[in-house]
Amino acid sequence: MMRMSSRTCSLEGRQLQMTEACLFLSEYAALMLGCGATCIRIEKNVRRMARAMGMRPVLVIMPSSVELTLWDREHRLSSCNTEPIHRKGIRFDMNTRLSSLSWELADGKVTFDEARRRFAVISRLKPANKWLILILASLANASFCRLFGGDLVSMGIVLAATLAGFRLRQIMLEDGIDIRLVFAISAFVSSVIGSAGYVFGIGETPDVALGTSILYLIPGIPYLNSMSDLLDGHYLSFLSRFMDAAVLTACLSAGLCGGLLAMSIKWF
Amino acid sequence: MNFAMEIIQDGFFAAVAAVGFASISNPPKSAYPWCAAIAAVGHPVRFVLMESADCHIALASLAAALAIGCLAVFSAPAAKCPAEAISFPALLPMIPGMYAYRTFQNLVLCLCCGEGEFHHYFYLTSYNLLTCIVVLLVMAIGVTLPIFVFKKISFKATRYI
Amino acid sequence: MQILVWIFIVACVLAAFVYRCFEKTHEEPVQNRHFFDAETGQRIRERPYIFDDEDEFEDM
């Protein structure tokens, strides 16, 4: 049980506790949404922590902000806060640590202040080594090519196309360029390199090489998150995440078409 | 024997693909081996169903996604991370890219050709588009359903890290 | 012709990579969006609000 006893505190003290708890929980929900967690997980985590502090939460999840209203058990005091969501891309490491933090707070293993300190540390978590991700993603896409029936030469072409496209994507995202433009340009570059089978007449499956060279860009996880929200009845979140994924898919298709036009390949 | 070798190859490349795509979404380090193992089991399920049982891709994808989802839910406590962190990347190698491309290909041909061939290309466009959408839908539902069915396990996975 | 276009595009991409390698790495400004102190866990009360489009309103 949390160290926030409601018996000995005055009304004013209890209101202050509720305000602090509301600010923490709304920031927590905003960070979880920012790192791509599903709505059901966020609701369960927030509810778990609020219940342990003797409060009732009501969470409203919107596409770019989250609103939390906290009521105490006797329904006398309340606190409300709206937090904007800052997108940090998909971060399952943050998601895991935040979920674990909610259990620690609920089980009484940490105090409220310690929980806030750990939250501050988690929010500053650095992503994995970008070169490692680059190499792993390129190998993954080459394996993808093999799964679709490509030969060794096609796998090599796809490896090169993914290395170039993914590195370009990393550079452009670091520079703060709009992600939709990033996807279009990366798809363009990857499809041009992926068309090497047609241009130089190498390999026996140039169509597979071209087809799989841009598949690493498909936003699979935002799409799967949207389905989870659909099943839980969060239709607004489902639509907004689905539209995000659809817009990015349209951008990469545009990049692919651009690449095919540039290479004058009648693949379609 | 040949078929067994093909299944093993399919599982191996699916595992490599899952690990690579998982790295893009920054999972905790403990999730990687589980991701690879589950993809190595789930993707061959679809392969076997389509090759030997002559299953439609949608049904085969549903079966594979359910398998991946269930395995992920039960291995989440051991992997010390949420079930989605393992199952979502393991599912990515199964996305039907070729159907999407054939949809666009036949759509363009639909618009370019004359009245006589319009019906044929329109049929191909619709078939590929519907297959693509249905496969994506059943995959997503298949992998998310176990998380909702086994709520107690999936939401307690990070309790004792 | 196709080969020339291909080589040109690939050369542009490689040039971008080489430029990026030797470009001075600009430091990312520290953004204090976070409410809580990483050492004490207390709320940072004098935290200024930082908006994403801060520079757009500089002239106003």
Image: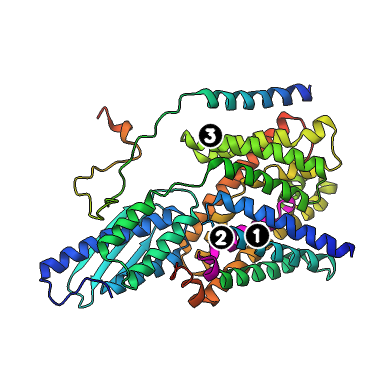
Q: Amino acid at mark 2?
A: Ala
Q: Quadrant of residue A138?
A: top right
Q: Amino acid at mark 3?
A: Ile
The residue shown at (13%, 66%) is: A13
Does residue A40 appear to the left or right of A3 in the view shown? right
Give A40 or B2, whichever is nearer the viewer: B2
Q: Amino acid at mark 1?
A: Ala
Q: Position of residue A229 (x, y in %)?
A: 50, 64
Q: Tell me which chain the residue with mark 2 is part of.
A: B
- Residue A244, above or below B138: above
Look at the magenta stretch and give its main secondary structure: helix
Per the image, label 1 sits on a secondary structure element best described as helix
The count of marks equals 3
- Mark 1 highlights which residue? B36
Most extreme residue toward the right is B1
Q: Quadrant of residue A48?
A: bottom left
Quadrant where the image shows the C terminus of chain C: top left
Q: Nearer the viewer, mark 3 or mark 1?
A: 1
The magenta region covers: B76-99
Q: Position of residue B91 (x, y in %)?
A: 64, 60
The residue shown at (28%, 76%) is: A1
The residue shown at (65%, 33%) is: A189
Instruction: Give residue B31's mark.
Output: 2
The magenta stretch spans residue A127: no
- Mark 3 highlights which residue? A171
Does residue A56 appear to the left or right of B40 in the view shown? left
Q: Tell me which chain the residue with mark 1 is part of.
A: B
Quadrant where the image shows the N terminus of chain C: top right
Could you tell me how far apart the alpha carbons at marks 2 and 3 are, in whole angstroms? 27 Å
Q: Residues within 10 Å of mark 3 (few under 14, many from 20)?
A: some
Instruction: Give residue B137's mark.
Output: none
